[in-house]
Image: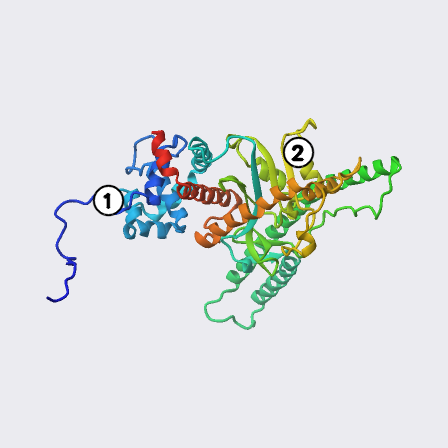
Amino acid sequence: MGPRFVNIDRDTPLLLPPNLRDWVSPDHLAHFVIDAVEALDLRTAKVNHRGTGDEQFPPAMMLALLIYSYATGTFGSRRIERSTFDSVPVRMITADTHPDHDTICAFRRENKALLSTSFVQVLQLAQRVKLLKVGQITVAADGTKVLAHASKHAAVSYERAGEMIAELELEVQQLLAKAEAADATPLEDGLEIPDEITRRQERKAALEKARAEIEARAHARYAAEWAEHEKKLAERQARQERGEKVGGKPSPAPSSEAQPTEQYNFTDPESRIMKAGSGSHFEQAYNAQAAAEVESRLIVGARVSPAPNDKEQLVPTGQGIPAEAGSVAAVLVDSGFHSENAVHAVEHTASGAPSGTVVYAAVEKTGHHRSVADLEKKPEAEPPTTGASGTEIMRHRLKTRAGRTLYKLRQQTIEPIFGIIKAALGFRQFRLRGLAKVSLEWMLVCLAYNVRRLHVLGAGPKLAGLS
């Protein structure tokens, strides 16, 4: 008897219409996404209530399509459209319908309220299935650079913009003189003097706008830095009046002048040149912030900043955690977030009363390698003396056994999350431009991550038990 093979027949049509759900395994992420979205309140979705025009795709299907696509590493609207034909799980989500890329892009761009409320509702869903604590949570926060949808080569510095304006003004004068000279040397074929003058004038206007924007940023920065400078001087003066020893010189006053190297990007003006790759190179990017609950590793707060570092991000990142996530008992951050004023603002209310939140922040960078001395058991560190600075208090807090144990959770919580988003999902660059739209897309990324994380944690059967 010869070998026997399964018959592969690609030409005979199916006798009965297939059920797409049967083609996707019951424990597949696509089934969970559909069930999770059905459990959400989608009344904030932007819908044409007039009933005019073409039929609309239901918001539940569109949201499920976006969440599943981002959770599986498909971000561009054209690629998402193509997946409605190529991917069986996507065809199941869309019920074999095919929204085009314009429809997908418009839905993503116009539904900020829907994405924000869905992010919060998914956290509440996690609380209902007992996968996220309700209140008194410990969060680890950090920022990661995500490329803007713009090239750093489309940027110009404040100094270079001034030089280019002077060059363009000179060239315009030369072209005007050439136009007045009857025997002037003609331009290359297809080039006209009026067109060349107009082109240079438009370029000059764009550069002047760039310089004005950089100057406006400098003035805004000056206002914030001046308030901080005056506060430090007042604190220094108060310590001297109390007879305390104050070392060093007073910090220099901030300047309202724009720095020559400050950049403006013509493609996405709100993005910035930022250090990337541990400072080895620079990229046109945004600073994507996230705060994650340490036990579930669910993202409970997400926001985007144009600031190139995390120095001023502790307070706004904490404020980005919705009230529905519950009270925050502890915040774990690295040395880039630490400042005495920021820690005080998080740990106290506006009236000065304790907020109930304790910050654990490294006050200086430390290596990952531990020496033999580091491995030896040590007695608890002596508490700081009365009147110790906030930095000294924080340093002692992280030297205590409880502080060390808690702070270890930071690295193993937030850094793997960024690794999953960038390496596993492949999200390394925003598709939208402008801070508002970029913030919306980052919210979608974090929403998709949370849904994927809940699926990994086995929330499917628990979710079915709620209905």
Image point (37%, 34%), residue name: 463
- Say what secondary structure mark 2 lies in: helix
Instruction: Give, as a three-letter code, the residue at label 2.
Output: Glu
Image point (25%, 47%), residue name: 23
The residue that label 1 is drawn on is 22
Of residue 157 and residue 86, the one placed in the foreground of this image is 86
Q: How is the image coloured?
A: rainbow
- Which label was assigned to residue 347? 2
Instruction: Give, as a three-letter code, the residue at label 1.
Output: Asp
Q: CA distance from mark 2 to mark 1?
A: 53 Å
Image point (28%, 37%), residue name: 55
Q: Are marks 2 and 1 in contact (CB under 8 Å)?
A: no
Residue 176, horizontal then vertical, whole percent: 59, 63
Residue 416, horizontal then vertical, whole percent: 51, 49
- Which label was assigned to residue 249? none
Sequence-earlier tag: 2 or 1: 1
Question: Would residue 421 be found to the left or right of residue 160 on screen?
Answer: left
Of residue 299 and residue 157, the one placed in the foreground of this image is 299
